[in-house]
Image (cartoon, coloured by chain):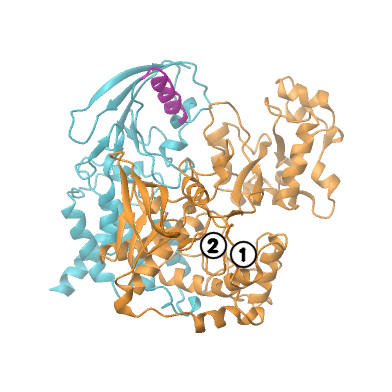
Chain colours: A cyan, B orange
């Protein structure tokens, strides 16, 4: 297979970036998208050019590191899959493919397709946890959890923190990511004592990082590789509202 | 030559850990604040150690090469975590978990350490649940358990097929809490390239800043390596791309002994290699062997025809198939232990009976299970796995047998440590994957 690629190249955070044309030939349909980029980078390196910088690690769809915006879609054309789970057979021979980074004001570009998503870590540091030191825990079965609640918490906890929701959102909102963590802990009794402060602090940090607001577009849910539901955002709004009233 | 002193505490096996804890030296809070600890790696071992040390009052510097500590490869573990809770009242105990673990390690692991692991397994589950890890529950709200290979009791706690992810995110939350409180300084996108020793003691590391490319120098009164296993010394493995074993290798070059490097788990059910461009191998859960039957054709001619695309699996008559695991190991059949299943697959392929173009692949066939249970039951049992296989190979395992081959998955060797988890370099400790 042969492809025309238009890849976003940007030297560093401050430089002006642009789409650069590459053609690549002899691509096997069973190759993953990242393996195709590996081959392209191998070609570039042999020619003495700078290879394309991109984030990746586990290559099995769970670490959340890979993050390409492929022909207008976060993680490419498939539903519920990460970039590393995309295979070249999903494209037609001769296709032109656009490859861009996850774009958002709060995700500054470091180089080429690599962005700085540390804003997510700073949001988690504001309350995406239960304050229990090692050794302070009670017996695990002292806290029964309704099975349905545990399932819902697990649905929310499946988030891999890749940032596709932010990249897909026209407002660059991080509501799906933040609400997934707030929901997980709001649905479990362990999250109870810190519930109100968690909602306030995480939402405030989200705003401070420069993420936009939710206008119920739903692109985040549509593009989420782990199918995190919009209902989490509704739950987060409720948590935030209740917390605001109580804190008043 | 360093002297190997394992420092196993005195006393009967069951009392060693308590003896140790009761007589270990304490550090007073004012002094803890003055001590800096470097933790390299933020997987289950590294993140938990960094958070726990910070909670105790030490100053911690944590390093990971990914963009966030949440991405460590512990996240890819699927099945579950064992603990001797005996919640099922099926006769489990610390000793039984200890015994099963020792047996699983071919009786070569250090008994005192394994007994400690079995003892602490109960606290680990308590801690994870308290952190909000959404383990599977029964209808009464209590924790669910399932059984797993190598044991006769149900002691495995699990969060769907994402147990590793959920455990890691729990540890990551604890770590981020300490980062937020200012007790841990996190250095992401940093790769350790050297252990610094002063007068024979580990006193820091040199790390490369992966954004600027600069080498940077960091001081610590002690250095903890939790940088993962060495599976990627093999050309292809199921490990993450970044799990490159540099840190453990550099420690070894600095004098830390390496133990049991032969201890590499070759997992029998991975998707076969399809081309020389391939970057990694993907594991298909071992649970597939519950219903799948492993076979290759009896004759080399049939295998060759399949390799060349002249025949497919359905063209091979039942009597011309060699269900070699059932033939060789009638009492265990397709559920024989991983090493045995892997070895048998290699034997069949070395015999010229492999069924993928490279010659390195065998069938894992669900046709009988589908006949017996119906498509819907089989589909429900392996809900996430079949679409994953189909996504990678473009073949539907409900219609045509899966093709599998063994691959390097997990390593049990690593840097040698004593009971206190110190390597043969004073002040250099090792946890989790890189440990032998």
**C-alpha gap between disc 1 and disc 2:** 8 Å
Quadrant in which the N terminus of chain B appears: bottom right
Is-magenta flag for residue A46?
yes
Residue B311: quadrant of the picture:
top right
For residue B277, side relative to residue B60 (left or right): right
Q: Identify the mark at residue B158; answer none if there is no mark.
A: 2
Q: Is residue A165 above or below residue A34?
A: below
Numbered range of the magenta stretch = A35-48
Q: Position of residue B179 (x, y in %)?
A: 29, 62
Q: Earlier in the sequence, mark 1 or mark 2?
A: 1
Q: Nearer the viewer, residue A231 or B319?
A: B319
Q: Is residue B371 visible?
A: no
Q: Nearer the viewer, residue B202 or B276?
A: B202
Q: Is residue B14 visible?
A: yes
Residue at the spot x=41%, y=80% of the render?
Answer: B26
Quadrant in which the C terminus of chain B appears: bottom right
Question: How many residues crowd mark 2 within 10 Å: few (<14), some (14–19), many (20+)?
Answer: many
Labelled pair 1, 2 in contact (Cβ < 8 Å): yes
Q: Which residue is mark 1?
A: B146
Q: Position of residue B270 (x, y in %)?
A: 62, 41
Q: Nearer the viewer, residue B198 or B314?
A: B198
| Label 1 secondary element | loop
Q: Is residue B359 above or below residue A199?
A: above
Are the residues flagged by discs 1 and 2 from a single subunit? yes
């Amino acid at each position: 297979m042969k492809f025309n690629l238009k890849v976003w190249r940007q030297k560093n955070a401050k430089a002006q970036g642009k789409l650069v044309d590459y053609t690549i030939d002899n691509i096997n349909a069973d190759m993953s998208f990242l393996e195709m980029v590996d081959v392209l980078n191998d070609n570039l390196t042999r020619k003495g050019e700078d290879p394309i910088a991109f984030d990746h690690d586990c290559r099995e769809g769970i670490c959340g590191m890979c993050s390409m915006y492929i022909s207008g879609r976060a993680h490419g054309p498939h539903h519920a899959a990460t970039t590393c789970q995309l295979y070249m057979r999903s494209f037609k021979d001769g296709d032109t493919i656009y490859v861009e980074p996850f774009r958002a004001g709060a995700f500054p570009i470091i180089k080429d397709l690599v962005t700085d998503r540390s804003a997510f870590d700073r949001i988690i540091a504001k309350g995406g946890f239960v304050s229990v030191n090692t050794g302070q825990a009670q017996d695990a079965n002292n806290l029964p959890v309704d099975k349905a609640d545990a399932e819902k918490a697990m649905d929310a906890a499946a988030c891999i923190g890749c940032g596709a929701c932010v990249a897909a959102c026209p407002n660059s909102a991080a509501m799906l990511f933040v609400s997934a963590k707030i929901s997980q802990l709001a649905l479990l009794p362990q999250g109870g004592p810190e519930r109100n402060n968690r909602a306030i602090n995480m939402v405030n940090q989200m705003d401070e990082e420069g993420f936009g607001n939710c206008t119920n577009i739903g692109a985040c849910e549509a593009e989420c590789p782990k199918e995190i539901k919009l209902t989490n955002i509704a739950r987060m709004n409720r948590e935030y509202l209740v917390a605001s009233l109580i804190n008043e | 030559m360093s002297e190997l002193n394992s420092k196993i505490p005195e006393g009967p096996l069951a009392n060693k850990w308590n003896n140790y804890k009761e007589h270990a030296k304490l550090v007073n809070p004012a002094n803890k604040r003055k001590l800096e600890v470097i933790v390299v790696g933020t997987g289950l071992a590294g993140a938990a150690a960094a958070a726990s040390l910070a909670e105790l009052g030490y100053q911690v510097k944590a390093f990971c090469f990914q963009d966030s500590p949440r991405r460590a490869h512990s996240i890819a573990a699927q099945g579950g975590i064992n603990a001797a809770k005996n919640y099922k009242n099926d006769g489990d105990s610390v000793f039984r978990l200890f015994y099963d673990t020792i047996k699983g390690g071919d009786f070569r692991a250090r008994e005192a350490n394994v007994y400690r692991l079995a003892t602490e397994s109960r606290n680990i589950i308590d801690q994870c649940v308290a952190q909000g890890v959404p383990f599977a529950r029964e209808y009464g709200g209590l924790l669910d358990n399932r059984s797993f290979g190598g044991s006769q009791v149900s002691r495995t706690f699990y969060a769907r097929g994402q147990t590793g992810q959920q455990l890691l995110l729990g540890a990551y939350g604890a770590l981020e809490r300490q980062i937020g409180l200012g007790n841990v300084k996190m250095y992401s996108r940093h790769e350790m390239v050297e252990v610094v020793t002063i007068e024979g003691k580990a006193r820091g590391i040199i790390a490369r800043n992966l954004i600027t490319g600069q080498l940077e120098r960091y001081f610590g009164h002690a250095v903890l390596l939790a940088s993962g296993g060495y599976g990627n010394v093999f050309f292809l493995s199921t490990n993450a791309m970044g799990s490159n074993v540099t840190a453990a290798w550099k420690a070894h070059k600095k004098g830390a002994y390496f133990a049991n490097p032969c201890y590499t788990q070759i997992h029998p059910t991975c998707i076969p290699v399809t081309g020389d461009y391939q970057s990694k191998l993907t594991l298909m859960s071992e649970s597939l062997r519950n219903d799948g039957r492993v076979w290759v054709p009896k004759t080399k001619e049939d295998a060759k025809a399949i390799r060349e695309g002249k025949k497919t699996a359905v063209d091979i008559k039942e009597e011309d198939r060699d269900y070699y695991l059932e033939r060789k190991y009638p009492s265990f059949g397709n559920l024989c232990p991983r090493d045995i299943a892997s070895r048998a697959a290699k034997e069949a392929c070395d015999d010229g009976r492999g069924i993928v173009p490279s010659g390195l692949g065998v069938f894992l066939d669900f046709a009988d299970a589908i006949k017996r249970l119906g498509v819907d039951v089989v589909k429900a049992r392996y809900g996430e796995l079949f679409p994953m296989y189909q996504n990678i190979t473009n073949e539907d395992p409900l219609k045509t047998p899966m093709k599998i081959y063994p691959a390097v998955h997990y390593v049990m060797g690593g840097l040698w440590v004593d009971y206190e988890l110190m390597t043969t370099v004073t002040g250099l400790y090792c946890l989790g994957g890189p440990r032998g």
